[in-house]
Amino acid sequence: MQQPRNRQFTLAARPNGPARLNDFSLVESEVPALGDGQVLVRNTLFSIDPYQRNLMGNGSSEWPTIAIGEPMGGPTIAVVEGSKNPKFGVGDHVQTWTGWQDFAVSDGSDLRKLDPNAAPLSTALGPLGLTGFTAWYGLTRVHDFKPGGTLVVTGAAGSVGSMVVQLAKRRGLRVVGIAGGPEKTAWLTKTLGADEAVDYKADEFEAQLERALPDGMDALFENVGGPIFPVLMEHFNQHAKMTICGTISDYSEAEPPQGTNYLPRLISLIHYRFISIKAFATPYVMDTFPDFLAEVTPLVANGEVIYGEEYVDGFSELPATLLKLFGGKRSGKKLIVRND
Ligand code: NAP
């Protein structure tokens, strides 16, 4: 019988602007050998996430990138194919960080064992994985958002934003979601329970925002950044709190974000309205992951939070699917690539 080979998508070049298909190389090698204490996993599902664009190197991120020739990183769902580690057995389902390759070995420390009967395995990439954790952490552990106040969420119909909307409603906040297009805004109010939704692509965006924020904005969960922030910041109430989760609008930029200089106005708003702005990154706060799972697993298992998934079939589709994430025309559902 023919031995399986290990396909990997490695980084071939750093994009100078939007990522392109030829920034990746498809390479094949032997399936890695299993050493003492190690686990051999075969990836079955790959999560596609905005930060993967930052891993390739760009003008806006200051965080570490992957080296040219290294496999693209990212969360996956995998099955254990071989184990010399007593904590894992062949056939176990795990969530890994092994990225865009068929097989990988791990010492087990970065593997999370999954119970396929507790929730669908794919949820470990979405509402019960990095996506849900990001929403939960940014909402509960960065600032103390008070019930009753108005929280604005940008990228609200995206994977993280849609979780923020629902978790914030459960915490008693009035939630205003910002998203692009009438389908997304209707989904936010009619399905997810946002109090108001504003279409930033509409001509009357600023008027819609005024109507949605009659008493101003007490909190902002920022997923997008870019040109709508200066419009939003004028709505900050006194003592407003802003959590910077991400700035996806500038991840494809070759240079650090440029634009009209609204910094003096922002500093003045911070001064006169006592605004508090904080940011976070999940890799630095993984110690709270068990608290997140304890709170959110029952909500997902009982169908109390809604999440959308869009599947793409085939390992070869990984690069194109990441490009699609930045193409500006997608549904906002979590993108998952099924291995073939
Ligand atoms: P996602 O599912 O792709 O959703 C992002 C949404 O952003 C899209 O649905 C899109 O909605 C909007 N968007 C606006 N400008 C965009 C652009 N130029 N390209 C692509 N989308 C754009 O992503 P996600 O997984 O929810 O991530 C949301 C944010 O969380 C990102 O900034 C990400 O980097 C951040 N994040 C941070 C952490 C952390 O540790 N701090 C961890 C994970 C994710 P519209 O069509 O409505 O514009």
Image: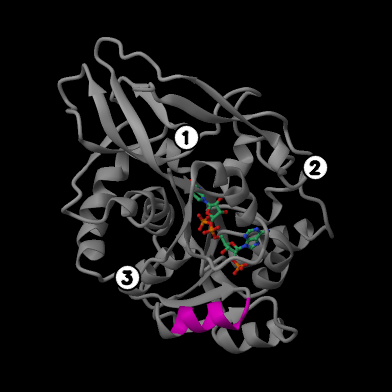
The secondary structure type at the circle numbered 3 is loop
Q: Quadrant of the C terminus?
A: top left
Question: On the image, numbered disc 3 is attached to which residue?
Answer: 171
Q: Is residue 211 visible?
A: yes
Determine the residue located farthest toward the front in the rendered image.
Answer: 1
Q: Residue at x 62, y 22 (%)?
A: 69
Label 1: few (<14), some or many (≥20) within 10 Å? many
Q: Quadrant of residue 144?
A: bottom left
Is residue 49 rendered to the left or right of residue 230?
left
Q: Amino acid at mark 3?
A: Arg
Q: Give whichever of discs 2 and 3 has the lower sequence position.
A: 3
The secondary structure type at the circle numbered 2 is loop
Residue 182 in magenta? yes
Q: Amino acid at mark 1?
A: Gly
Question: On the image, numbered disc 2 is attached to which residue?
Answer: 255
Residue 258 in magenta? no
Question: On the image, numbered disc 1 is attached to which residue?
Answer: 99
The dominant secondary structure in magenta is helix
Q: Give whichever of discs 1 and 3 has the lower sequence position.
A: 1
Query: For the magenta stretch, what is the residue range?
Result: 181-189
The CA span between labels 1 and 3 is 34 Å
Q: Nearer the viewer, mark 2 or mark 3?
A: 2
From the viewer's perspective, is residue 2 above or below residue 153? above
Q: Quadrant of ligand 1?
A: bottom right
Of the pair 325 and 305, the residue shown nearer to us? 325
From the viewer's perspective, is residue 329 above or below residue 34? below
Image spot of residue 258 (x, y percent): 81, 51
Q: Residue at x 26, y 63 (%)?
A: 300
Q: Is residue 110 visible?
A: no
Is residue 98 rendered to the left or right of residue 83?
right
Determine the residue located farthest toward the right in the rendered image.
Answer: 260
